[in-house]
Amino acid sequence: MRYHLKERGLNLSDDFIIRDETGQVVYEVKGDFLQIGDTFSIYDRETGNEVLYLKKKILSDTTHYDITQNGVEVASLRRRAQTLNAGITFEVSSKDGMVFYVQGNFKEWDFNIVDHYDRLLGHISREFALFGDSYTVDVVPNVDGPFILAIAIILDEIREDGGKDYSDSGR
């Protein structure tokens, strides 16, 4: 499934619209402007229900985001202490024991999400946009689309923050 993630321009908070490959809006993402640390909620456009909630840990020695669903933490994304030869810069650990890796860099804005067997789960690339940031997110069949979209949103926020993790990742 292909998604198109578009940041709403001229907005104080980081809000996104997510369309499917037919152009239909399927998710909305709302960032909390007055929150300490980045927070985002992904909402199903049809039902209005929150699908995932993303929160940056502010007292962490490296980039660390928790991903929760229905109030329960389901995964966390962390900056790896060292970049491996495959360009892996972030590790995503799910609460069921699965580990995923984000391969790529911010300079080309081209990322793959793979499992520990190096099987592709998703791909994130940048699209041209006059206003706001825009991304294509491809998700392999039978993989949780909102979960891969959450990773794309976190990567955008890391780039926007312009912190150490961004500059160390091939900026």
Image (cartoon, helix red, strand yellow):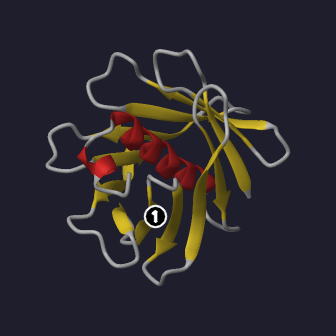
Residue 19 placement (x, y as % from top left): 73, 40
Residue 153 visible in the snapshot: yes
Quadrant in which the N terminus appears: bottom right
Q: Which residue is drawn at 30% across and 49% down?
A: 167
Residue at coordinates 41% horizontally, 45% vertically from top-left? 68
Q: Is the residue 120 above or below the residue 66 in the image?
A: below
Q: Is residue 114 toward the left or the right of residue 136 in the image?
A: left
Which residue has dot 1 on it? 104
Where residue 35 sits, quadrant-wise, is: top left
Q: Nearer the viewer, residue 109 or 156?
A: 109
Label 1 neighbour load within 10 Å: few <14, some 14-19, many 20+: many
For this orientation, the residue located farthest to the bottom is 117
Q: Which residue is drawn at 45% across and 33% down?
A: 40
Count of marks, rendered view: 1
Using the rendered image of the protein, determine whether residue 71 is visible from the camera's viewpoint: no
- Name the secondary structure under disc 1: strand
Q: Nearer the viewer, residue 8 or 105?
A: 105
Above or below residue 148? Residue 36 is above
Left or right? Give the position of 24 relative to 49. Answer: right
Q: Residue 114, percent across and down?
A: 50, 72
Mark 1: amino acid? Gly
Q: Where is residue 95 in the image (x, y as percent from the top left)?
A: 36, 62
What residue appears at the point 27 percent right and 41 percent down from the top-left corner? 163
Residue 158 position, x and y percent, is: 37, 42
